[in-house]
Amino acid sequence: MHHDAGERPFIVIWEVTRACQLVCTHCRADAIRTRNPFELSTEQGRKLLDDLASFGTPRPLVVLTGGDPFERPDLPELVAHGTSLGLSMALSPSVTPRLTRKVLARLHEAGAKAVSLSLDGASAATHDAFRGVDGVFDDTMVAARMVRDVGYRLQINTTVTRDTVHELPGILRTVLDLGTTLWSVFFLVPTGRGKLLDALTAAEEEEVLHWLHDVSDLVAIKATEAPHYRRIALQRAGVADLDSVFPVGPLRAALREATEGLLTGNEPRRRMPRPPIDVNSGRGFAFVDHVGKVYPSGFLPVAVGSVRDTPFPEIYREARLLQELRTPDSFGGRCGRCEFRTVCGGSRSHAYAVSGDPLAEDPSCAYQPATGAIPAPSQNAAATPAA
């Protein structure tokens, strides 16, 4: 980022509705079949977009999510209004019969530029079980190609658990075949329905993040709820013999072997890796739910205000919790004394889910910081290494 994350967010996610026809096992929220009558109205939604545009340049990226945002009939109007204000509008729909070429084309004409779809398994068996509906894997393949055909940038979102982690190389192969612009790998936070699934251990997550860095020259990668990916990018920068400095464990070895087998004979073009963007819950990032409550993240369910009562910029800049989340020196345990705290800060959502304290140590990170007084690295230093 090239602006102060305390002054304005880089990205804002707006859950325009919680209605959804899928029953995903990992959902952070208890999605419902029908729309809540207390959702933000069209006019309230337009006012929220006005507030987001009032930040000025650079304006936040706005992602309309759910539930399933395609459950809202006024979605084209909201997209068009945001676009007219200079906001970059993106969509994160569920793959249901509502996702049609006609609707995609209408929303693209209204100004939406990117669409993200979920792919949580390398096969129909795994993905359909994850989504709770048979046939959704095949429908997702059709939808992804349709998204590209209409002219959108395609993002694929993948939630990784202990039960699905070995499918990541297969998902990567599909991600590449679909011409994906960005692969966002979500590390499970035990909240909502996700409490019933098995998250990776901290050591396993470290191995997966190293593997993601290994393949980050194949597709742009975002590690969601794993900000220590930025720490790994910094640690690996300029290291000639990575395996001697970061020994390969059994999980990463298995992922590497499977990746090599899937890419042999069809080697994709290598590219400059995408540097991981320095955003975290409440720091460059915020979430607005379907009734207008503002949260540091959709995975950190502590409301800091409501856009029904207070303009979003005022909430973002002045809410006490958001200010605390932008002050990593006050974090507890290893996170507060880590030399990478200003460019990582740990997953605040994981910290809250496990301890009930959003400022606590992140239990999903295995890194042991150096002891003693540690100077915080500069933001400029973090911007250079690629990841």
Image (spheres, grey):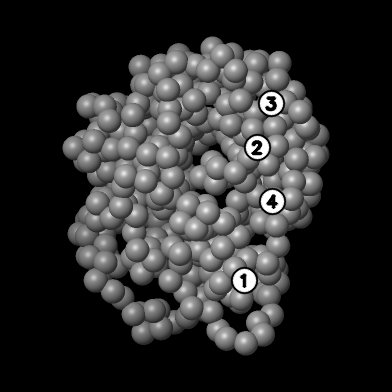
Closer to viewer: mark 3 or mark 1: 1
Question: Which element type, helix, strand or loop, lies under badge 3?
Answer: helix
Give whichever of discs 1 and 2 has the lower sequence position: 2
Mark linked to residue 379: none
Distance between the Cα atoms at labels 3 and 4?
28 Å
Marks 3 and 1 in Cβ contact (< 8 Å):
no
Residue 231 x/y as whole percent: 53, 69
Distance between the Cα atoms at labels 3 and 2?
19 Å
At 63% from the left and 40% from the top, the residue drawn is: 303
Above or below, 273 against 369 in this view is: above
Question: Which element type, helix, strand or loop, lies under badge 4?
Answer: helix
Give whichever of discs 4 and 1 has the lower sequence position: 4
Residue 247 is left or right of residue 51, and the answer is left
Distance between the Cα atoms at labels 1 and 2?
25 Å
Tell me the residue that label 4 is attached to.
Answer: 321
**Visible residue check, residue 149:** no
At 49% from the left and 25% from the top, the residue drawn is: 18
Distance between the Cα atoms at labels 2 and 4?
11 Å
Give whichever of discs 3 and 4 has the lower sequence position: 3
Tell me the residue that label 2 is attached to.
Answer: 294
Farthest front residue?
Answer: 356
Residue 90 is left or right of residue 350, and the answer is right
Tell me the residue that label 1 is attached to.
Answer: 336
**Visible residue check, residue 287:** yes
Marks 4 and 1 in Cβ contact (< 8 Å):
no
